[in-house]
Amino acid sequence: MSQITRSTPTEPAFFALIGREERWELIGGEPVMMAPTTQRHANIIANVLAALHVQLRGTG
């Protein structure tokens, strides 16, 4: 029976992934490519940030 061995990437190897177009994150020490966002998702994020900005303006 063959066994799969996994190695944690070195810091330079992980940062080499970040330089690409894809988005990556570490989960349990393993690099995992994140799904791309959609335009709808970007619009939702923009609306949430705008609403937060209005609510937090002048509170700091």
Image (cartoon, grey):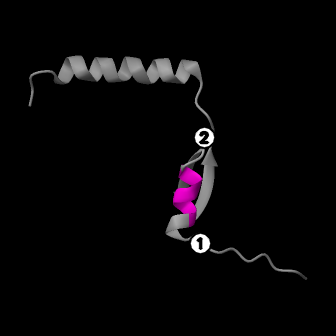
Residue with the mark numbered 2: 21
**Residue 52 in view of the camera:** yes
Per the rendered image, the range of residues in magenta is 13-18
For the residue marked with disc 2, what is the amino acid? Glu
Quarter in which the N terminus is drawn: bottom right
Between 13 and 34, the residue placed more toward the observer is: 13
Can you say whether 21 is above or below 26 in the image?
above
Can you say whether 38 is above or below 32 in the image?
above
Can you say whether 37 is above or below 20 in the image?
above
Give the x, y percent position of residue 56.
18, 24
Residue with the mark numbered 1: 8
Q: Residues within 10 Å of mark 2 (few under 14, many from 20)?
A: few
Q: Residue at x 33, y 23 (%)?
A: 49
Can you say whether 25 is above or below 53 in the image?
below
Where, by quadrant of the figure, is residue 38 drawn? Answer: top right
Give the x, y percent position of residue 39.
57, 19
Q: Which mark is residue 55?
A: none
Judge depth for marks 1 and 2 and give the one in front.
2
Which element carries disc 2, helix, strand or loop? loop
| In the image, farthest residue toward the right | 1
Where, by quadrant of the figure, is residue 3 drawn? Answer: bottom right
What kind of secondary structure does the magenta stretch mostly adopt?
helix
